Image (tube, rainbow, N blue to C red):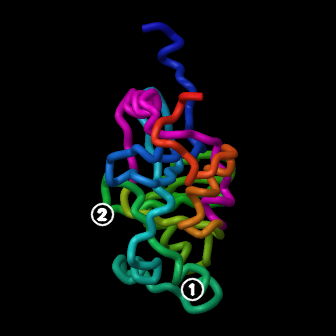
Amino acid sequence: MSAATNHAISLANHFLIAMPAMADPYFARTLTYLCEHTSEGALGLIINRPLDFNLATLFERVSLPLAAGAHQAKYNELPVYFGGPVQTDRGFVLHRPAGQWQSTLVVTSEIALTSSRDILQAMCEQGEPSDVLVTLGYAGWAAGQLEWELSQNAWLTVPADPEIIFSVPPEERLPAAMQLLGVDFANLSEVAGHA
């Protein structure tokens, strides 16, 4: 194996846009934020599939009382998302600023993914971090799997915009990511890569 195949381009901090032909029901019409991409595989969160409950319900389920006040209102109504089909019983918090937590994957200087309970406690008690997207589960790819899927035109990729993750309503995230590429999702054909 040559050195070139060992050092592939990392797509961490990119969006994966599911192509219209995506048959996998977990990923059809999804926008996934890629948190890690190495030669060992990739990890991401689907960011446009809200579940039918919100953070207030999640905090109740994990026995963390949300302190009354400004941050209670800030978090209460935020939806919890289906982050992917792996470990759907575990919570993952995509957030900015990155901060210091027990179990964190730093994606960029401002965005991180944390899976430890201490971040939920901080959200309840201090209302921090300021921007959060909470999922149950994540999307994972084995070594070479994502590259193969990309070669099969299953995904479009584009550098991520944090505003789409944290400020755009869930139903508008996929079209907003498409706009970064200058493409209207409604006009995207079933077959990509043929000009």
The residue at the point 55 percent across, 46 percent down is 188
Residue at which label 1 appears? 72
Q: Position of residue 65 (x, y in %)?
A: 45, 85
| Range shown magenta | 138-167
- Residue 8 appearing in the image: yes
Query: Front-most of 130 and 166?
Result: 166
Q: Which amino acid does the dot numbered 1 rest on?
A: Gln
Residue at which label 2 appears? 89
Q: Disc 2 versus disc 1: distance between alpha carbons?
A: 24 Å
Specify whether 138 is left or right of 31: left
Quarter holding the N terminus? top left
Is 127 situated above or below 90?
below
Quarter holding the C terminus? top right
Q: Position of residue 70 (x, y in %)?
A: 65, 87
Q: Identify the mark at residue 155; answer none if there is no mark.
A: none
Q: Residues within 10 Å of mark 1 (few under 14, many from 20)?
A: some
Specify whether 118 is left or right of 89: right
Q: Which amino acid does the dot numbered 2 rest on?
A: Asp
- Residue 40 appearing in the image: no
Q: Position of residue 107 (x, y in %)?
A: 58, 46
